[in-house]
Image (tube, helix red, strand yellow):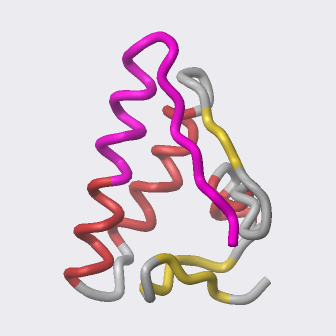
Amino acid sequence: MGIRRICSIELFPTRTPQFTWAGTIDWYGDTVFNRLQAPLLRRDWALLIQNAADEKTEKLLKRIDKLLQRCASEVHHYVKFYGD
């Protein structure tokens, strides 16, 4: 339930109702999102971008959002998060 880090950037508490899809990212295993799931994750991602702690965090989140957008709009594209 603690804050997770990617590239030394704090992101969000896991498994909270506010982050239905982002909360499913497994920080110790790998998590893959397909084109049907990507739009749902992007809703959570928009909240993360809005509440970014600083410019560096916002920039990273926006780059990931672009990947999610591409994944959502094209067949056979996936976004994969690699755990520890």
Residue 23: image quadrant is: bottom right
Q: Is residue 83 above or below residue 20?
A: below
Residue 45: image quadrant is: bottom left
In percent of width and height, residue 30 lies at 72, 52
The residue at the point 51 percent across, 14 percent down is 76
Residue found at the very far top of the displayed protein: 75
The residue at the point 35 percent across, 33 percent down is 69
Q: Which residues are magenta?
A: 64-84
Residue 83 placement, left or right of 42: right
Q: How many marks?
A: 0
The image quadrant where one finds the C terminus is: bottom right
The stretch drawn in magenta includes residue 15 = no
Nearest to the observer: residue 66 or residue 50:
66
In percent of width and height, residue 52 lies at 35, 78
Residue 59 placement, left or right of 42: left
Nearest to the observer: residue 35 or residue 44:
35
Q: Is residue 21 above or below residue 48?
A: above
Q: Is residue 39 above or below residue 35?
A: below
In percent of width and height, residue 1 lies at 79, 83
The residue at the point 64 percent across, 87 percent down is 3
Residue 51: image quadrant is: bottom left
Residue 40 placement, left or right of 46: right
The residue at the point 57 percent across, 37 percent down is 40
Nearest to the observer: residue 69 or residue 16:
69
In percent of width and height, residue 18 lies at 65, 64
Q: Is residue 7 above or below residue 31?
A: below
The stretch drawn in magenta includes residue 72 = yes
